[in-house]
Image: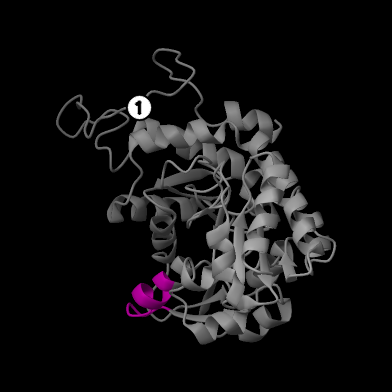
């Protein structure tokens, strides 16, 4: 079944009781049992809810997993995944991951005994070099946030498997529409569902899936034990958003490429990060492992002091954190989404103060280009 069809008919796409083509919002916390210790399919909505279950089946179907898990945020999903590891375990992590991911590693799991090393995961030799006797996992973003680095997931996973490492891939930027990490060898796929999957900036969620039955059992336990589950209303919103993922991602990609090409040709811009550009270091690899390049573009101005005046001058690109909605957003990672990463680590990874990240939305592309032109002019560059 083609993914465009799965987006609409995958998972549980209708209510088995009434035949409703939209799974109802089961707004309940508990369920009547047949007798003492004899629950029906559901017994308590932290452990399971029909609306949430439909979403979980859908993300598993889209990513090729055996079971899906819906959380109250992307970071709640990451928390559950990292809880698979034990004190003393060591993980390898990309050097420009989302700031919240770095924060939960550094501020939560390190004090609980987890160790990690930051590396450029697009460099396979760097992965191999930094594997230690206690290394248990490899955490990837591809494309990465915010520098849009491309990691060879298949090669990295093959390398990791030789050392019995668990391979986790944050697939938020690409979405299952453009990339299938489990098919490339990953063990677990993570999404901030808040972004492209929801697609309308109206719900916060996290989604996780795996193609390993044992890992699925462990994640199910952690989801229930930790308890940061997605509510039925938000689960319904996520399913509604996912139905249009295909048409949205195609348009995001078209607009993003036009924006990236414009920025690359502008004299005030020193560098553009977009895997759809042939000038991007990972372009050929992205073409190989992805079916599209998504809608995120990052770039640097020659005059980094103009970054703040520029973003504040924009009218259609809203100055805000998050990404993946129908509206275009702009942010400065060093003081917004990645501010939790120490400056020296940010700059070592290439996240400089003049870096600007765009989430290119679905507006008419010529209007977006005009907004960028006017913003650059107002910023004096």
Task: Examine the rendered structure and indicate whether residue 191 appears above or below residue 146.
Answer: above
Q: Is residue 95 visible?
A: no
Image location of residue 258, percent across then percent down: 77, 50
> What residue is pinned by disc 1?
25
Image location of residue 98, percent across then percent down: 52, 66
- Quadrant in the rendering for residue 111: bottom left
> Does residue 264 appear to the left or right of 334 in the view shown?
right
In this view, the residue farthest toward the left is 36
Task: Specify the quadrant that holds the N terminus.
Answer: top right
Residue drawn at (40%, 12%) of the image: 18
In this view, the residue farthest toward the top is 18
Residue drawn at (61%, 80%) of the image: 349
Image location of residue 219, percent across then percent down: 41, 54
Q: Is residue 96 visible?
A: yes
Task: Examine the rendered structure and indicate whether residue 334 appears above or below residue 8.
Answer: below
Looking at the picture, the colour scheme in use is: one colour
Of residue 220 and residue 8, the one placed in the foreground of this image is 8
> Does residue 45 appear to the left or right of 250 in the view shown?
left
- Quadrant in the rendering for residue 4: top right
Q: How many marks?
A: 1
Residue drawn at (67%, 47%) of the image: 368
Task: Examine the rendered structure and indicate whether residue 208 appears above or below residue 117.
Answer: above
How packed mark 1 is, by other alpha carbons closer than 10 Å (few <14, some 14-19, many 20 or more), is: some
Image location of residue 374, percent across then percent down: 66, 56
Dot 1 falls on a residue whose secondary structure is loop
Task: Specify the quadrant that holds the C terminus.
Answer: bottom right
Q: Which residues are magenta?
A: 103-114
Q: Is residue 224 magenta?
A: no
């Amino acid at each position: 079944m083609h993914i465009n069809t799965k987006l609409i008919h995958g998972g549980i796409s209708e209510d088995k009781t009434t035949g409703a083509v939209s799974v109802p919002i089961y707004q309940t916390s508990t369920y009547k049992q047949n007798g003492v210790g004899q629950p029906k399919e559901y017994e308590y909505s932290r452990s399971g809810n029909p609306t949430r279950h439909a979403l979980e089946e859908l993300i598993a179907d889209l990513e090729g997993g055996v079971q899906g898990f819906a959380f109250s945020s992307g970071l709640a999903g990451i928390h559950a995944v990292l809880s698979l590891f034990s004190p003393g375990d060591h993980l390898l992590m990309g050097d420009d991951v989302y700031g919240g991911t770095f924060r939960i590693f550094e501020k939560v799991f390190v004090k609980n005994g987890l160790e990690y090393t930051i590396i450029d995961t697009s460099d396979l030799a760097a992965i191999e070099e930094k594997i230690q006797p206690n290394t248990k996992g490899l955490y990837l973003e591809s494309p990465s946030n915010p520098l849009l680095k491309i990691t060879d997931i298949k090669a990295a996973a093959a390398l990791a498997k030789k050392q019995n490492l668990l391979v986790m891939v944050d697939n938020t930027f690409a979405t299952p529409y453009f990339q299938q990490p489990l098919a490339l060898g990953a063990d677990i796929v993570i999404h901030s569902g808040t972004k492209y999957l929801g697609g309308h900036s109206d719900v916060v969620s996290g989604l996780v899936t795996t193609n390993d039955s044992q890992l699925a059992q462990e994640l199910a336990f952690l989801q229930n034990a930790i308890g940061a589950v997605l509510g039925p209303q938000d689960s319904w919103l996520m399913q509604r958003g996912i139905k249009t993922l295909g048409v949205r991602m195609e348009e995001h990609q078209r607009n993003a490429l036009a924006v990236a090409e414009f920025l690359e040709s502008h004299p005030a811009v020193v560098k553009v990060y977009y895997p759809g550009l042939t000038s991007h270091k990972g372009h050929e690899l992205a073409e190989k492992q992805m079916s599209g390049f998504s809608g995120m573009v990052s770039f640097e101005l020659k005059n980094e002091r103009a970054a703040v005046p520029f973003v504040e001058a924009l009218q259609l690109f809203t100055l805000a954190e998050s990404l993946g909605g129908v509206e275009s957003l702009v942010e400065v990672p060093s003081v917004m989404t990645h501010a939790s990463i120490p400056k020296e680590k940010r700059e070592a990874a290439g996240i400089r103060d003049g870096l600007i990240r765009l989430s290119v939305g679905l507006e008419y592309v010529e209007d977006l280009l005009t907004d960028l032109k006017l913003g650059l002019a107002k910023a004096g560059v």
